[in-house]
Amino acid sequence: MHFFRCDDRGAWRRGWAASLHAAWLCVACWPAQAVDVGLAGVFPGKALLTIDGGAPRTVAVGTKTDEGVKVLSVDSDTATIEADGKKRMLRVGQNIGSQSSGEGGAKATLTADGSGHFVTSGSINGTTVRFLVDTGATMISLGAGEARRIGIDASKGQSAVVNTANGQAAVVRVKLDSVRVGDIVLNNVDALVHQQDMPLTLLGMSFLNRMEMQRDGQTMTLKKRY
């Protein structure tokens, strides 16, 4: 038990070829996207990686994936990888997005409601949810009904207890495959599922601590740091 704080024929052929060439030029001009990599586990000479939200796969040291992620070394609970020409060390359970050489990380802009709360639509595992930004919540927190609607199997999680304004509450700690807010997408995010229903899903620090948060009056901007 653990405790926590609460996306004509020749002319036609020449025209088609020219259009195709132009299309490829446009593709070449698109900015490179960040590769999102998570470390799910380590084995002798191998790392268990999740890449861009895909299923975990074993990648041997020295091997480079189709996404351009190369495992350089592994240790007891860490792996050093190379992505987009950058070396990074990950601990088991950690997730990083290697930044593109464009304008930096993805952003989301939120507007406060009449009560001063920042409520926004987003998604968990591809299912739309309503989030309430809560810097006082250690992790993303969902009600039991919302978790079932999304398809989260809480029975496979880890039992825990949290301290709330109404006292202690039993919860289950789970991993979310993906969490999206605006243009920001994170993978393998820690969350808590409560036994009772909740009016909104709390966007807690397991998501927010990977953001730069800037508030300007009734507007809050989140920018993905890693």
Image (cartoon, rainbow, N blue to C red):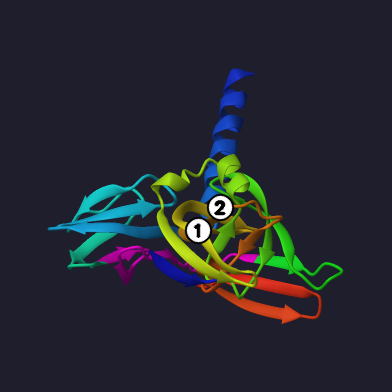
Q: Secondary structure at mark 1?
A: strand
**The N terminus is located in which quarter?**
bottom left
Give the left or right position of residue 12, taking residue 193 as reference.
Answer: right
Q: Quadrant of residue 23?
A: top right
Compared to 221, does 13 lie above or below? above
Q: Amino acid at mark 2?
A: Gln
Precedes in sequence: disc 2 or disc 1 = 1
Q: Nearer the viewer, residue 3 or 81?
A: 3
User: Left or right of 167: which side holds 85?
Assistant: left
Q: Is residue 165 above or below residue 50?
A: below
Mark 1 burial class by Cα count in 10 Å: few <14, some 14-19, many 20+:
many
**Magenta-colored span:** 80-107
Q: Does the residue at mark 2 contact the one at mark 1 (Cβ under 8 Å)?
A: yes
Is residue 120 rendered to the left or right of residue 179?
Answer: right
View extreme (right): residue: 114
Q: Position of residue 13 (x, y in %)?
A: 56, 26
Q: Where is mark 1, residue-wise?
A: 171
